[in-house]
């Protein structure tokens, strides 16, 4: 009969999650509480710097996945004077999926609501002008439904709150095409999100909300006037959002973006009319991001 092991049964080593601070087993792949990949934490510990988290938020279907995929792709292709290195192959998955779909003239599929299915990306970004300053960027691609659920009743998706609490900056996507067509939905959703963000930042003890928030008017190819004057477009078509920004946020700016140059319409296998991107012509993708880094 084997003798009982003499070693101690000390709890095996744990590590706090970078996002929600829950203790996880060292060998865990994703955080048991918020589903952030534990590889993030290991990378961050190895860097010995506080990572800079930039969170992309917005309603379902505003274009978060497409925007984030393009942003990461442009950064890793050394756009402007950025130099970005993905840390871990999992970081490339989102970019890979978005670019591959658009190359075959399709938009990527809808992001799953479940947090354990989200793509997370961890990139180290430096600029040629100041190569010694390195930003560790953590950017998850979240589902709009999850963001809406959390904003409507906080603590439904705690990962979203933890992320925003830890974020150095946020990118809020607003569907400019819908707003230009007269729908109040983009304005109300953005207003709710900004007031949610306001609440989080206030509880962090910031009296003046200095966290930079870049408001990205997406799908601006449908309403090109956005590019000429994004602030003017927001004042006219997103007045509630404009007012809360002006009243509560010290650092906010509006940007117009679009990823496609032209769109065709066809039907899918269920006979639904769906848009097909005929050619890719990214505009205004890097500017919001550059602006956030200039404030951090
Ligand atoms: N016209 C136009 N449509 C876009 C653009 N980006 C996204 N879309 C449309 O918006 C839909 C949703 O995009 P997605 O990135 O999945 O949105 P998410 O739900 O916020 O992640 C896509 O399927 C496209 O139909 C763009 O730059 N221009
Ligand atoms: Mg998505
Ligand atoms: Zn966690």
Image: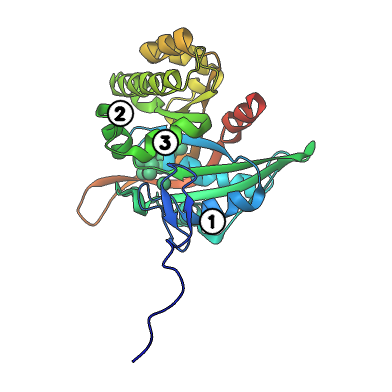
Rendering coords of residue 283 (x, y %): 56, 34
Q: Is residue 211 visible?
A: yes
CA distance separating discs 1 and 2: 29 Å
Mark 3 crowdedness (10 Å alpha carbons): few <14, some 14-19, many ≥20: some
- In this picture, residue 178 sits left or right of residue 14: left
Mark 2 crowdedness (10 Å alpha carbons): few <14, some 14-19, many ≥20: many
Residue drawn 44% across the image and 15% down it: 234
| Residue labelled with disc 2 | 151
Q: Nearer the viewer, mark 2 or mark 3?
A: 3
- In this picture, residue 91 sits left or right of residue 272: right
Residue drawn 63% across the image and 45% down it: 75
Q: Is residue 35 above or below residue 170?
A: below
Coloured how? Answer: rainbow
Q: Nearer the viewer, mark 1 or mark 3?
A: 3
Asked if labels 3 and 2 touch by Cβ distance under 8 angstroms, the answer is: no
Nearer-N-terminus badge (1/3): 1
Q: Is residue 37 above or below residue 259?
A: below
Within the image, what quadrant is residue 128 found in?
Answer: top right
| Residue labelled with disc 1 | 92
Rendering coords of residue 196 (x, y %): 36, 23
Secondary structure state at the residue bearing disc 1:
helix
- In this picture, residue 94 sits left or right of residue 84: left
Q: Is mark 3 within 8 Å of ligand 3?
A: yes
CA distance separating discs 2 and 3: 13 Å
Mark 1 crowdedness (10 Å alpha carbons): few <14, some 14-19, many ≥20: many
Q: Is residue 185 above or below residue 136?
A: above
Nearer-N-terminus badge (2/3): 2
| Residue labelled with disc 3 | 162
Within the image, what quadrant is residue 200 found in?
Answer: top left
Near-viewer residue (107 or 252): 252
Near-viewer residue (185 or 271): 185
CA distance separating discs 1 and 3: 23 Å
């Amino acid at each position: 009969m084997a003798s009982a092991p003499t070693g101690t049964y000390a709890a095996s080593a744990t590590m706090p999650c970078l996002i929600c601070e829950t203790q996880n087993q060292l060998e865990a792949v994703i955080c048991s509480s918020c589903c952030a990949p534990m590889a993030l934490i290991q990378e961050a510990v190895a860097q010995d710097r506080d990572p800079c988290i930039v969170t992309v938020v917005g309603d379902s279907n505003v274009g978060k996945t497409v925007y984030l995929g393009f942003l990461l792709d442009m950064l890793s292709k050394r756009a402007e004077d950025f130099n970005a290195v993905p840390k871990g192959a999992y970081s490339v998955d989102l970019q890979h999926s978005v670019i591959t779909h658009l190359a075959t003239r399709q938009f990527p599929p809808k992001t799953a609501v479940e947090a354990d299915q989200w793509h997370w990306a961890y990139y180290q970004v430096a600029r040629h002008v100041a190569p010694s300053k390195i930003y560790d960027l953590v950017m998850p691609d979240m589902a709009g439904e999850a963001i809406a659920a959390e904003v409507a009743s906080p603590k439904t998706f705690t990962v979203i709150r933890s992320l925003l609490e830890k974020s150095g900056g946020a990118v809020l996507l607003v569907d400019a095409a819908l707003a230009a067509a007269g729908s109040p939905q983009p304005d109300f959703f953005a207003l709710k999100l900004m007031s949610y963000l306001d609440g989080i930042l206030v509880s962090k003890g910031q009296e003046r909300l200095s966290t930079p928030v870049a408001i990205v008017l997406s799908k601006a190819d449908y309403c090109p006037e956005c590019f000429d004057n994004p602030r003017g477009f927001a004042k006219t078509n997103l007045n509630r959002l404009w007012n809360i920004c002006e009243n509560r946020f010290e650092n906010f700016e509006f940007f117009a973006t679009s990823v496609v140059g032209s769109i065709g319409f066809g039907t899918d296998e269920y006979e639904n009319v769906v848009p097909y991107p005929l050619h890719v012509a990214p505009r205004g993708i890097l500017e919001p991001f550059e602006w956030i880094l200039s404030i951090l």
